[in-house]
Image (tube, rainbow, N blue to C red):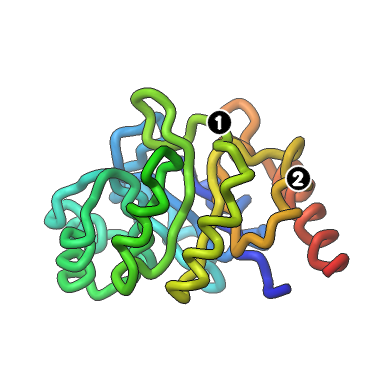
């Protein structure tokens, strides 16, 4: 089994960043969209000056954003990946990649027709995150979708030759169950928090399960 991709998202402070940079995560995520975890890119820029993150890649989460806004964030924060978390179209992603010249992941919200939606991004998206859509929230709800559908998304991502991360309601109580599926990676936000802040002990527990899973395969 290849190394599991780990993304810890929704970082809101220098302290959060310090904790996740000291983890096994490959990706550090920041939300630049309307959310309770929204962060100002100027603040992120200042935090990053005080933290060593050379071995991590930065991901910016956006929802149906103007490309000019994403470009302005890129002028402040050295993102490696743009994560489109809304109803962005393949044509939008094509233009976004042309403008920014960096990788774009597309979030697919699990619902009827979502697999067909994913197929529409073949050759365009550089990766996928499968998440739960809850009421008026685009993500970060702490709610899981029905994981029995995971193999269908993984199969489609493999067909396209790109990674597929699973998000939505992942926490210490269900990570063992999730890792039974042959997933490429996990994307966690609320599941590594205590009182709204990233928690080192919770992260260590998550990563113990990840390491056990690797040892068994």
Residue 123 place in picture, x, y as percent: 32, 74
Residue 199 place in picture, x, y as percent: 67, 40
Q: Is 74 displayed left or right of 175 in the figure?
A: left
Q: Residue furthest top?
A: 135
- Would you call the spot at circle 1 few (<14 residues within 10 Å), some (14-19), or many (20 or more)? some
Nearest the viewer among 51 and 64 is 64
Q: Mark 2 to mark 1: distance in Å?
A: 15 Å
| Quadrant assignment, res 171 | top right
Q: Is 3 displayed left or right of 55 in the figure?
A: right
Which of the image's four quarters has the N terminus?
Answer: bottom right
Residue 85 place in picture, x, y as percent: 34, 47
Q: Does residue 92 lie above or below 145 as drawn?
A: below
Number of the label disc, if any, that sits on residue 55: none
Number of the label disc, if any, that sits on residue 177: 2
Q: Does the residue at mark 2 contact the one at mark 1 (Cβ under 8 Å)?
A: no
Q: Decide if residue 84 is in sight here.
A: yes
Q: Is 93 displayed left or right of 202 in the figure?
A: left
> For the point 18% across and 57% down, which residue is it?
72
> For the point 22% across and 60% down, which residue is it?
90
Q: Secondary structure at mark 1?
A: loop
Q: Does residue 25 lie above or below 8 as drawn?
A: below
| Quadrant assignment, res 105 | bottom left
- Would you call the spot at circle 2 few (<14 residues within 10 Å), some (14-19), or many (20 or more)? few
Which of the image's four quarters has the C terminus?
Answer: bottom right
| Quadrant assignment, res 97 | bottom left
> For the point 59% across and 37% down, which residue is it?
146
Residue 190 place in picture, x, y as percent: 57, 35
> For the point 41% across and 43% down, which residue is it?
109
Q: Where does label 1 land, which residue?
A: 143
Q: Secondary structure at mark 2?
A: helix
Q: Does residue 63 lie above or below 214 as drawn?
A: above
N-terminal label among 2 and 1: 1
């Amino acid at each position: 089994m290849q190394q599991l991709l780990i993304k810890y998202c929704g970082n809101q402070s220098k302290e959060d960043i310090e904790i996740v940079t000291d983890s096994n995560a490959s990706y550090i995520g920041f939300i630049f969209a309307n959310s309770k975890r929204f962060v100002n890119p100027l603040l992120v820029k200042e935090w990053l000056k005080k933290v060593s993150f050379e071995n991590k890649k930065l991901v910016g989460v956006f929802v149906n954003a103007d490309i000019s806004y994403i470009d302005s964030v890129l002028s402040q924060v050295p993102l490696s990946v743009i994560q489109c978390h809304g109803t962005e179209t393949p044509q939008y992603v094509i233009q976004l990649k042309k403008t920014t010249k960096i990788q774009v992941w597309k979030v697919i919200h699990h619902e009827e027709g979502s697999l067909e939606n994913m197929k529409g991004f073949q050759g365009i998206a550089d990766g996928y995150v499968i998440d739960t859509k809850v009421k008026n929230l685009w993500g970060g709800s702490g709610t899981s979708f029905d994981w029995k559908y995971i193999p269908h998304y993984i199969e489609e991502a493999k067909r396209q030759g790109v990674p597929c991360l699973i998000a939505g309601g992942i926490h210490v109580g269900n990570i063992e169950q999730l890792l039974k599926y042959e997933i490429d990676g996990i994307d966690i936000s609320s599941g590594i928090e205590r009182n709204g802040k990233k928690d080192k002990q919770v992260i260590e527990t998550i990563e113990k399960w990840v390491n056990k899973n690797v040892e068994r395969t």
